[in-house]
Image (spheres, rainbow, N blue to C red):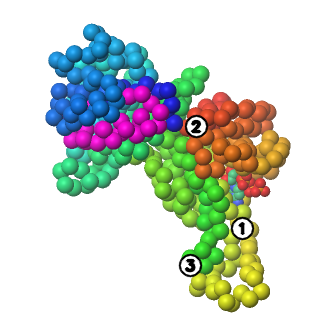
Amino acid sequence: MLTGKQIAVVVTGGIAAYKVPGLVRRLIKAGASVRVALTPAAERFVTAETLEVLTKYPVLREGVAYPDPVAHIALADWADVSVVVPATANSLGKMAQGLADNEALSSLLANQGPVVFVPAMNHKMWANAAVQRNVARLRADGHYVLEPGYGFLAEGYEGKGRMPEIEEIHAGIEAFFACQNLDRPLDLTGQRLVISAGGTEEPLDPVRYLSNRSSGKMGTALAHVALLAGAQVTLVQTPSAQSLPALPGITTRQVTTAQELYTAMHEEIQSADILVMAAAVSDYRAAQASEQKIKKQDQAQGLQLDLAENPDILASLPKDQAFVIGFAAETQHVVDYARQKLEKKGAHMIVANDVSQAGIGFASEDNAVQIVTPTDVLAVAKQSKYGIAAHILAQALKERK
Ligand code: CTP
């Protein structure tokens, strides 16, 4: 959620600007207050009137009166963050150079904190060396630049340059606030993170499976926060996590069963700095999955399922390669059980949550956890899974030193 956040949406002149009203609506629905600035070129793609109706506030643009006479400074001072969406190659270039030849870009130069850029352009322009140099410059200056997606472009063919989907931009903004809302901003530059998310599915027959209530939201939030913090991220998704948006720039790998997850994690840990087992693994699978659908009339005496134990992936992973973080879903004695899991599975850190409490844990947007290390227990109060993710990763960096 973005409750109480004040977001300036700065629109520059690309065709993807036509999607901005949808983004603005979504941010408002998530609890944010939104004000908009349009460059002259953006006004050719989206109208100020539409955005004024949605935000209930005048749009900052050339030659039109604004509620404050020093308009660009007023907008920058008001905003907790400015999000440039879509960010054209031209505007990225100007900002990398500190140039501002219109009201909207002037407001960006007046920002005290980092700006979030959401580039969208033709894939050949995105690949251009000068554009990449400008993106690197902006990142080095402490700004956040989301990767464009791969997909259908306005030109009528596919390529990397597409504006991320609205729900992905929303996720990126949540992750941005989570990275910033710590004692000091989370920085994972140069780190490779591997994160598993969701619940495994163990087939019983071609139409049925054993699984659990894991939604994949915690693991996906970890991946988004790690990406925004500058890490190279691989997200290993079970089916429940595959339906959640994953920001472009995250490498995804898809698995279904615990055994597939086992293979994926053992391969991925080879080049990982930090590995997080956020997936809820089914402890058991059918000893022999039926090739045909199990029929009801064949089971006059009720159905007996013969289950075989799955490998414990966390316990089996090498611990000398990467900093390994596990989770513990408990309904009682939360810290004691987490300590036992830390020791038994040889993890460097266990994130314990009480899944019996309503409003946190499985499937909800929020969580409250205890981070258990060999020497410490750190309680992280109830907050969004993005906030929890940032605390977990910040603690991992501290512990690893
Ligand atoms: N885990 C795993 N492989 C399994 C079971 C669990 O890698 N076969 C990992 C989970 O990803 C999590 C941690 O171990 O990071 C703890 O999972 P949890 O379900 O809480 O614990 P279990 O070991 O299954 O123990 P129990 O169900 O008895 O509490």
At a point 47% along the width and 27% down the height, the residue shown is 5
Estimate how packed mark 1 is, as few (under 14), some (14 to 19) or many (20 or more) residues with alpha carbons within 10 Å. Answer: some
Estimate how packed mark 3 is, as few (under 14), some (14 to 19) or many (20 or more) residues with alpha carbons within 10 Å. Answer: few
First along the sequence among labels 1 and 3 = 3
At a point 43% along the width and 25% down the height, the residue shown is 6
Marks 1/3: CA–CA distance: 17 Å
The amino acid marked with disc number 3 is Pro
Q: Is residue 82 above or below residue 149?
A: above
Asked if residue 19 lies in the magenta stretch, the reply is yes
First along the sequence among labels 2 and 1 = 1
Give the quarter of the figure containing the C terminus. top right
| Residue on which disc 1 sits | 284
Is disc 2's CB within 8 Å of ligand 1? no
First along the sequence among labels 2 and 3 = 3
Q: Place residue 170 in its image quadrant.
A: top left
| Residue on which disc 3 sits | 206
The amino acid marked with disc number 1 is Tyr
Q: Place residue 88 in its image quadrant.
A: top left
Q: Main secondary structure of the magenta part?
A: helix
Residue 111, how many percent across, how many down?
37, 17
Q: State the extent of the magenta-drawn residues as a range.
A: 11-34
Per the image, label 3 sits on a secondary structure element best described as loop
Marks 2/3: CA–CA distance: 37 Å
Residue 150, how many percent across, how many down?
32, 51
| Residue on which disc 2 sits | 384
Per the image, label 1 sits on a secondary structure element best described as strand
Does 256 sit left or right of 63 as displayed?
right
Is disc 3's CB within 8 Å of ligand 1? no
Q: How many marks?
A: 3
In this orientation, does residue 96 appear?
A: no
